[in-house]
Image: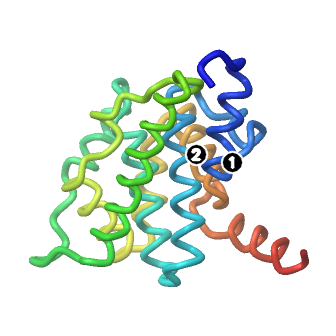
Amino acid sequence: MISAPEDLRRDVLYEALRCSSSDAESIPDRLKLPLCVTRFWFQYRQQNHPDHQTNMSCLQALVLGFVYGEADADPEFKARMDGLQPGGSHLQLDVAHAFSQWQNCMRQSLHLNQLLSFPLPEPQCSWLYCGPLLHKLQNALLSHSSTFTELKVLLAERRRVLLETSLQSAGVGPSGDDEGCQTQTRKKRRN
């Protein structure tokens, strides 16, 4: 497989993640693998774990976390994210399970990418996932429906576009709602 052309190896990786090259076209190279993994994970969660609010808040937390992890993220956005308060005294097991599933998908996809001789750039894993931050963020998103919009407004235009592209790549509307999911679900039902 190593001697296969790069685009064939990339297609193998996309197929494993149930993604297409057209789905990943508008995604920056550094986020192609994490966002394809996130799409795969979110689709699995929607099919097998019907708690839509938890799934959506976890997805929003992940993509906001990707933006937060960028080296040149907006200072006001970072400060607001850093100021999030823990959302309770107990770890929410369903949320921990959802994030654990995402981490496992990411780890296995990194291995497959490596096995295929890196048809997609390997992401900076250290900024992809920060558990304590994502748990606080997910709780804030679930507790206050305006949190996502408030955080999104703090982003510079190019970061907002990145956030919206990230959500759309997961099959969710750019505003972080489930309009994309509902459209995909309707298409699947018709077929």
Q: Residues within 10 Å of mark 2 (few under 14, many from 20)?
A: many
Q: CA distance from mark 2 to mark 1?
A: 6 Å
Quarter of the image holding residue 131? bottom left
Quarter of the image holding residue 128? top left
| Residue ID at (71%, 64%) | 180
Marking on residue 143 = none
Name, please, the residue furthest toward the left: 89
| Residue ID at (42%, 76%) | 54
- Mark 2 vs mark 1: which is more N-terminal? 1
Q: Position of residue 23 (x, y in %)?
A: 72, 43
Q: Position of residue 4 (x, y in %)?
A: 69, 20
- The front one of 23 and 104 is 104
| Residue ID at (41%, 64%) | 58
Q: Residues within 10 Å of mark 1 (few under 14, many from 20)?
A: many
Secondary structure under tag 2 reads: helix
Name, please, the residue furthest toward the bottom: 50
Tally of numbered discs: 2
Marking on residue 19 = 1
Q: Is residue 139 above or below residue 164?
A: below
Cβ atoms under marks 2 and 1 closer than 8 Å: yes
Left or right of 129: which side holds 191? Answer: right
| Residue ID at (42%, 49%) | 64
Q: Quadrant of the N terminus?
A: top right
Left or right of 28: which side holds 104? Answer: left
Q: Position of residue 150 (x, y in %)?
A: 43, 57
Name, please, the residue furthest toward the right: 191
- The front one of 124 and 157 is 124
Q: Identity of the amino acid at label 1?
A: Cys
- The front one of 11 and 180 is 11
Marking on residue 36 = 2
Q: Identity of the amino acid at label 2?
A: Cys
